[in-house]
């Protein structure tokens, strides 16, 4: 099995090309591949599979715990770079390539560096889902812009809820450096109000055009960046009238540009970087179902 190690703003992935649809990705194999001590190590696996009508490529994304999320904003930029740099996809007359995901088909455009290779990708992420039942989020007040989650220890957490194809909760904090990401992240990720679990963002508004953000990702833990999380944070804070239509989202792994006007679709722009290519040892693959350290 050949692979490429790549990242989008330090959210890293093992990319497995599979346009012949030969490979399966059982949970044990994904967990073993993403194990940072006994495997290759990554936040997730991206299998590049054949698409269907309207999109020649399907992004089969798996989290480090083996789960199959609906969408990955950083991952789709990595996939776009991979297929465009290798001529596996051809842009249409408008420079757009369509990539299928579990959250639907996404339109992407790319910018190339001086070496002719893709360096930056813009993704039309679609319209955010704001109705709590569709996020999904269980609430008695579907009209509230900011919801409240009660924890068992008595804390009441105000949170904005948005789906970008996958569910997100967004908290405002005074300082992302001291935000209780490791404490509140897993509690909110698995809270009963999020029946499908959720990614949890901790955001500090710097001004109307920029925020700092850290994200606890469902099925992974804290990552250096989360593309859908950046989109969700901007939308949630725009609904609170705190941000304008174009926002620089500063994450530990780098900066993403998010453009969105309420009622429209969300556009995310950010880098895509390939680090290395290689071949996975066949004997290791044959025994990849052995116990591995939790990738978190």
Image (tube, rainbow, N blue to C red):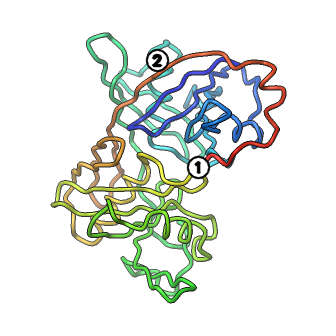
Q: Which residue lies most toward the front here?
A: 37
Q: Is residue 256 left or right of residue 46?
A: left
Rendered image: mark on residue 270: none
Residue sticking out furthest to the top: 115
Q: Position of residue 209 (x, y in %)?
A: 17, 55
Q: Which mark is residue 70?
A: 1
* Residue 251 horizontal/vertical position (percent): 33, 48
Q: Residue at x 49, y 36 (%)?
A: 12
Q: Going 63% across and 42% down the picture, which residue do you hit?
A: 62
Report helix, strand or loop for mark 2.
loop
Residue 100 image offset from top left, x and y in percent: 56, 36
Residue at 54% from the left image edge and 47% from the top image edge: 71
On the image, which quarter does residue 77 sit in? top left
What residue lies at 32% left-to-right and 70% top-to-bottom? 172
* 278 over 52 or under it: above or below: above
Q: Secondary structure at mark 1?
A: loop
> How far across and down, in percent of the image, does residue 72 sit?
51, 44
Q: Residues within 10 Å of mark 1 (few under 14, many from 20)?
A: some
* Residue 10 appears left or right of 283: left
Q: Identify the residue position indicated by label 2 in the image.
A: 90
Q: Looking at the image, is 225 positioned above or below residue 213?
A: above
Q: Nearer the viewer, residue 203 or 193?
A: 203
Marked residue nearer the N-terminal end (2 or 1): 1
Q: Is residue 200 left or right of residue 197?
A: left
């Amino acid at each position: 099995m050949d692979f490429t190690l790549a990242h989008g703003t330090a959210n890293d992935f093992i990319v497995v090309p599979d346009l012949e649809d030969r490979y399966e990705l059982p949970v044990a194999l994904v967990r073993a591949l993403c194990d940072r001590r006994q495997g290759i190590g990554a936040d997730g696996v991206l299998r590049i599979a054949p698409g269907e009508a309207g999109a020649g490529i399907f992004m089969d994304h798996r989290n480090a715990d083996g789960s199959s999320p609906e969408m990955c904003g950083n991952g789709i930029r990595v996939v776009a770079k991979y297929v465009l740099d290798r001529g596996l996809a051809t842009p249409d007359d408008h420079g757009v390539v369509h990539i299928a995901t579990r959250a639907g088909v996404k339109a992407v455009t790319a910018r190339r560096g001086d070496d002719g290779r893709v360096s930056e990708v813009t993704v039309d992420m679609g319209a955010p889902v704001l109705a709590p039942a569709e996020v999904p989020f269980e609430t008695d007040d579907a009209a509230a812009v900011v919801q409240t989650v009660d924890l068992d220890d008595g804390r009441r957490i105000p949170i904005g809820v948005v789906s970008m194809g996958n569910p997100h909760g967004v908290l405002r904090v005074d300082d992302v450096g001291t935000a209780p990401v490791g404490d509140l992240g897993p509690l909110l990720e698995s809270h009963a109000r999020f029946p499908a679990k959720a990614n949890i963002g901790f955001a500090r508004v710097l001004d109307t055009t920029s925020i700092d953000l850290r994200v606890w990702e469902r099925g992974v833990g804290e990552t250096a960046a989360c593309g859908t999380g950046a989109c969700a944070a901007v939308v949630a804070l725009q609904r609170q009238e705190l941000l304008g239509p174009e926002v620089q989202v500063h994450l530990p792994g780098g900066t993403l540009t998010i453009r969105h006007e309420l009622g429209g679709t969300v556009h995310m722009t950010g880098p895509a970087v390939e680090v290395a290519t290689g071949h996975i040892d066949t004997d290791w693959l044959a025994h990849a179902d052995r116990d591995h350290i939790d990738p978190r």
